[in-house]
Amino acid sequence: MTHPAQPKASHFINGAYVEDTAGTPIPVIYAATGEQIATVYAATPTIIEQALSTAKAAQKEWAKMTGTERGRILRRAADIMRERNHDLSVLETYDTGKPLQETLVADATSGADALEYFGGLAASLTGEHIPLGEDWVYTKREALGLCVGIGAWNYPTQIACWKGAPALACGNSMVFKPSETTPLCALKVAEILIEAGAPAGVFNVVQGMGEVGGALVTDPRVDKVSLTGSVPTGKKVYAAAAAGMKHVTMELGGKSPLIIFDDADIDNAVGGAINGNFYSSGQVCSNGTRVFVQKGIKEKFLARLAERTGNAILGDPMDEATSFGPMVTENQMNIVLGYIEKGKEEGARVICGGARADMDGYYIQPTVFADVTDEMTIAREEIFGPVMSVLDFDTEEEVVARANDTEFGLSAGVFTKDFTRAHRVIGNLEAGSCFINSYNDAPVEAPFGGVKASGVGRENSKEAIKHFSQVKSVYVRMGDVEAAF
Ligand code: NAD
């Protein structure tokens, strides 16, 4: 019997599901059991051509609609997503293995937030009038054209909406390629947009591995590429986009610092460290995986952290009581277990976890290492799993320097009751998305993105509009033209 997660077909192009079984089969594995629940096929050159030519043609008409009309469609799509939140959350859980307890509140809901927010902004995207005596200049905010979105596997619904919603609000069309690991959810976003009244072809989904992404990025018809992925992939995609002088947004990896001063509320700081390391089993790009704890509260912090981490409920992700799910794939589980072994070998102290969980599926125990030093591999490389490194520090100056000593710069957090210090420290940290006495909040109203190797551009908020549109300026002469000859 066909599993309910199996989509009607692999791709969604020009308003309809499309199949081409000549492409490489991509098995979809449910991470909680290891069973294959669906198959999709990577896009063939024919499918890629269909998607790009359709999106190119559809964009012109879409951009001619008023912002109010485009916005209404996006807001209707948001309503449909909210009405179907339960089913979409179950699908997200099948796609990623993340527990339903999370997906019910974090995935289709945040996708709907993006559709609603950018739907609301669509009608207010205007230019300005610049008076120059008798003459004047006016500016227009125009769409970029055809945009390509490429997703990572941790938030397949959210990533499709975070890219699709601002792109469409500005009058662009999009071809979206989900991660080959989680190909299911973006198809639902495409389906819902059509149901909400989007013209066929403005949002298309094609499946495939890196080669399909590469073919999309290098196509001369494409004006913009927005990638969520790792730094090595980001470098390749950025270079390919540069060759065609295309616009880019790069949402890449991180190794973010979370700094806890000794005056912090311990339970809030522990809560921040848990949210910033164990949500989605640690598969979150902005995670605060280097937790710097001031020496005075180190043992108290570790004791409370171990106690609360012990309350994590590992189990069937479809059971709403489960608060901690498996790694997305067996491969990702093995990568993370490799880092855990490295941490032990290099002398870090295991406070809790430190091994695969004794159950079916790709579960790793939430793991905390203490006595981690800056040179250890687990303190330098992005692990993308439930592995928290706790490092000690003495002074503010020292911890800021150590926190910044990394190629990454996605997020940073600080816990302290001293507000002057909180703002000073955040001001000195090299990161794009920061938190004071909190960690990992990502409301659509706030800009999200990194500095240094963690990325270029911003998603969400009014900032995203700048990255999906461009300004045309028009000089208008009211009198005669003077010329030298
Ligand atoms: P990945 O870099 O392996 O893949 C990302 C996407 O790029 C996939 O869809 C993949 O098929 C595609 N791709 C791979 N090679 C390509 C190429 N040459 N041309 C075009 N596309 C190509 O990343 P992943 O393993 O899926 O995701 C985990 C990474 O994503 C982590 O580093 C994580 O930090 C990062 N991430 C960042 C954010 C953010 O918003 N900053 C959010 C989630 C994940």
Image: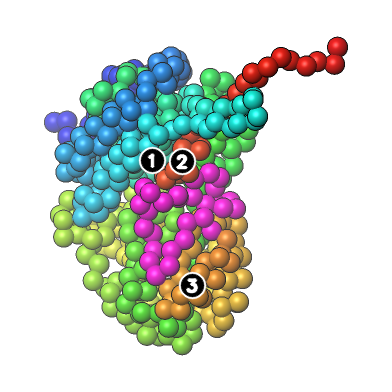
Which residue range is magenta in the image? 431-458
Q: State which quadrant residue 397 falls in.
A: bottom right
Secondary element type, mark 2: helix
Question: Which residue is labeled 1 in the image?
Answer: 162
Q: Are marks 1 and 2 in contact (CB under 8 Å)?
A: yes
Q: Secondary structure at mark 3?
A: helix
Q: Which mark is residue 422?
A: 3
Q: Please check the rendered image and state whether residue 451 is part of the magenta-colored stretch, yes or no.
A: yes
Q: Is residue 95 visible?
A: no
CB-based contact (under 8 Å), mark 3 and mark 1: no
Residue 88 appears in the picture as rendered: yes
The amino acid type of the residue labelled 1 equals Trp
Circle 2 Cα neighbour tier, 10 Å, few/some/many (<14 / 14–19 / ≥20): many
Between 355 and 284, the residue placed more toward the observer is 284
Residue 242 in the image: x percent, y percent?
63, 33
Q: Quadrant of the C terminus?
A: top right
Q: Which label's residue is closer to the chain start, 1 or 2?
A: 1
Pick the front one: 215 or 32:
215
Residue at 27% from the left image edge and 56% from the top image edge: 325
Picture quarter containing residue 268?
bottom left
The residue most toward the bottom is 296
Label 3, label 1: how far apart the Cα atoms are: 29 Å
Q: Quadrant of the N terminus?
A: top left
- Relative placement, left or right, of 115 versus 220 is left
Residue lying at 29% horizontally and 71% vertically, measured from the top left? 309
**Horizontal arrangement in the rendering, residue 334 relative to residue 246 (left or right):** left
Q: Nearer the viewer, residue 229 or 456?
A: 456
